[in-house]
Image: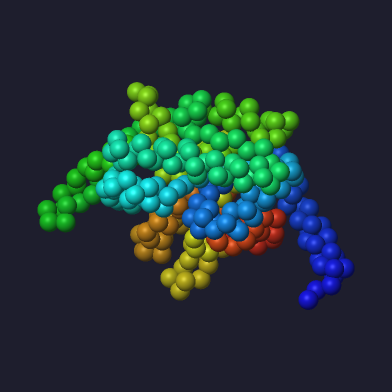
Amino acid sequence: MTDPVTQARFTARTLSEALPYIQRYAGQTIVVKYGGHAMVDPALAAGFARDVVLLKALGIHPVIVHGGGPQIGSLLDRLGIHSEFKDGLRVTDEATMEVVEMVLSGPINKTIVRAINQAGGKAVGLSGSDGNLIRAEKATRTAKDPDSHIEQVLDLGFVGEPSAIDTTVLDAMLRADAQLIPVVAPVGVGRDGARYNINADTAAGALAAALGASRLLLLTDVAGVLDKARNLIREIPVAAIPGMIADGTAAGGMIPKLETAAHSVNHGVGAAVILDGRAPHALLMELFTEHGAGTLVS
């Protein structure tokens, strides 16, 4: 067992080594997509909340965008509402949208807010509907019929994609003297007033671009982007992403994450990182250590 003096010395050295990185990000905005195992494991959730409060205390401005797919699915099952996926997106009819908004803007959002506040922060829960933060339009997808190979339009219901971001509310919250930490549920509003279910990665990327964020951090349940030998790829240039998707290096749920990362970087975000939310203090490891904690897209 390490004696207290040795442990204190190690902690002091770690803080000292982090100084250049703290200075780099001071005053910068960091958008974090929060979801997966990190959100449902109590110990990881508590650690995440403390880390977010620490970022704010160091003069960094975190904006949290959260998902909630498993929780939505669980409540839909309990209510007996059938739900299906097309092209990796949940088909969202009116009844499903009612549940989506209730779960995302209600218990999930407020659980994260309470955890951050319990850790000493001042978190405020929002959805994309507040202040017209996320304007959305109906998402369009096509798929080939397996028999005729003819492209068919998929009707995903109230699944949306960001069409415009109004950062007025966030700008007010992110003032240095406000000390507020926004926690955003990815529910957008259409120009006709309809509400839309937006993929949390996509919403986080759109907000990061609109805010000119220094970093977009996408927490996931894998170590990052893996090569075909299952080794972590430390850095990927945006130009390499289409080839990685085409040759199968990136597949499944990693494709939209890489596409979101590329889009955000192409629209002014300093860099995007796909990292393992199951690792304790993943945010701090990524931001304040030399080698980071995931895959950097730049």
Q: Is residue 74 left or right of residue 56?
A: left
- Residue 113 is situated, as x and y percent measured from the top left of the image, at 59, 41
* Picture coordinates of residue 193, whole percent (x, y): 37, 24
| Residue shown at 15% from the left, 49% from the top | 150
Q: Is residue 142 visible?
A: yes
Residue 77: image location, x then y, percent:
32, 50
- Is residue 30 positioned above or below 247 on the image? above
Camera-nearest residue between 171 and 80: 80
Q: How many marks?
A: 0
Name the outermost residue toward the bottom: 1
Q: From the viewer's side, name the closer residue of 85 and 135.
A: 85
Residue at x 53% of width, y 47% of height? 33
- In which quarter of the view is residue 278 placed? bottom right
Decide: is 270 above or below 38: above
Q: Against 196, is 258 above or below?
A: below
Would you identify the image quadrant in which residue 116 lies? top right
Q: Is residue 212 visible?
A: no
Q: Which residue occupies 84% across, 64% down?
A: 8
What colour scheme governs how the chains and residues are painted in the rendered image of this protein? Answer: rainbow
Q: Nearer the viewer, residue 144 or 61?
A: 61
Quadrant holding the N terminus: bottom right
In the figure, is residue 106 to the left or right of 97? right
Q: Residue furthest top?
A: 192
Q: Residue furthest left?
A: 148
The location of residue 231, given as percent across then percent down, is 51, 71
Q: Nearer the viewer, residue 12 or 126?
A: 126
Determine the residue located farthest toward the right in the rendered image. 5
Q: In the displayed structure, does residue 40 sit left or right of residue 98?
A: right
Please report the residue visible at 64 percent of the width from the left and 58 percent of the height from the top: 281
